[in-house]
Image (cartoon, helix red, strand yellow):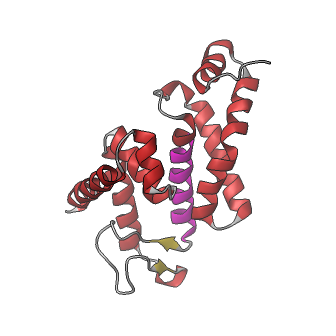
Amino acid sequence: MQNKATDIELIHKVLHENDSRAFGELMQRYTSQVYGAALRLMKDEDEAAEVVQMAFIQAYKQLDSWRGVNFGAWVTIITNHLALRQLEKEKKTVRVDEWTNGRTDEGPEADVADDEYDEEHEQQLQSLEQAVDKLPEQDRQLIKWHYYDGVPLQTIAERVGQTENNVKVRIFRIRERIKKMMQP
């Protein structure tokens, strides 16, 4: 029985031995996770598959900037960024989360359709993405898991070794920081 290589070992093979099969194994491990994240945002199977392909290409090109965080989470973050940019570019329906900049008239989860899409909303999304990008890696990861990937709080708590209540408080505080960062 052969031991399965860790993500770190596979990444080392890609970077130092130019082993493309090692990256292929990483892709096999995380494609379904990354595809799920892309599909939640894109809501179209073909577009989600395209975003996943672009995400793995970008991950491969930027592999030397990987800093030892969970590889699947890292590629998922790349996927989320690419999907959001694609949605903004195509001006498709974009979900506005309650923590962006207050609630809309229709509530925190209002959809903005093509004919209602405006520059102010696009700037708000860009401002949100920039604010999230400025967060420390641990905080950014919590936000990505909870809001982008829909990971349950209990699962996040297990991943970071904290209680669910601690994770809730951390996410609340991070949201408050994001709101302040987004204020003019």
Magenta-tinted stretch = 75-91
Image quarter where the C terminus lies is bottom left
Q: Is residue 159 above or below residue 99?
A: above
Single out the residue that lies furthest toward the front: 163
Residue 81 belongs to the span the image colors magenta: yes
Q: Is residue 42 left or right of residue 112?
A: right
Estimate the x, y position of residue 38 in percent, counting from the top left: 61, 56
Whether residue 85 is situated above or below residue 61 in the rendered picture: below
- Check the image and report above or below for 112 versus 71: below
- State the predominant SS element of the stretch in magenta: helix
Pick the residue in front: 52 or 89. Answer: 52
Q: Which quadrant: the N terminus?
A: top right
Give the quadrant of residue 9: top right
Locate residue 24: give its quadrant: top right
Query: Which residue lies at the image location 72% right of the left edge and 19% below the top edge?
Result: 3
Q: Position of residue 51 (x, y in %)?
A: 64, 52
